[in-house]
Image (cartoon, helix red, strand yellow):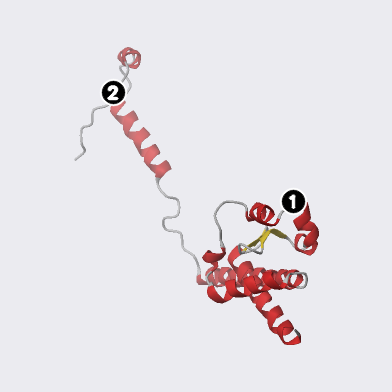
Amino acid sequence: MGRTVSIWIPDDLEADLKEQSRINVSAICQEALRRELARLRPLGEGVEIPEEVVARLRQENDEYERASREKGFKAAIVWAKQARLTELKYWLDLGANAKTMPSLVKSVRDPLYEWIDQFGGSEEDLLQRYPALQDIGVVMFEPEVGEVCTAEGDPDAFKQGWLEGVEAFWNRVKEML
């Protein structure tokens, strides 16, 4: 059995309802409540996802992460060829001591401006120093703080590739020093 619920009706609406005796207020309210509940109900209930779709998406995700990691690796090699020894060592320490990507993510402050504040110059100076980074899609780079990101791809995979690239570069060059 249903439940009786009281609803508040403003005076002007009550006056109009009295003039229309054929209106079933209860039925109208029930229908309005059903429509609202249907609107609020999650749409994903009962969606079946075939295993082949999951397998395809898993493969696409793996390829996406791999491409992002490769992009980070290549960007690190380009950067490392121009980097100062202190910057290389900073990134090597960062990679050795912080293999988890969240530790590379800084606060919402823009690390680019931190770099400019610390070392002087302007954004243009930074881009002049590392023009190849802009060419390959690195949109934020902060060697002293440990922040690097790209506009495309998976950011964590890109950062992992970056660390791997710096380490690979260093392993090749350190014996030559």
Q: Which residue is mark 2?
A: 8
Left or right of 105: which side holds 28? left
Vertical order, 9 against 76 (above or below): above
Q: Quadrant of residue 141?
A: bottom right
- Number of labelled discs? 2
Q: Amino acid at mark 2?
A: Trp
| Residue 60 shows in this picture | no
Query: Residue 39 location, x and y as percent?
Result: 43, 41
Query: Residue 125 location, x and y as percent?
Result: 78, 55
Vertical order, 159 against 122 (above or below): below
**Mark 2 or 1, which is nearer the eye?**
1
**Crowd tier of the residue under label 2, counting other residues whose Cα lies within 10 Å: few below 14, some 14–19, many 20 or above:** few
Query: Residue 173 location, x and y as percent?
Result: 74, 82
Q: What is the secondary structure assignment of the residue under circle 1?
A: loop
Q: Residue furthest left?
A: 1
| Residue 113 shows in this picture | yes
Query: Residue 8 location, x and y as percent?
Result: 28, 23
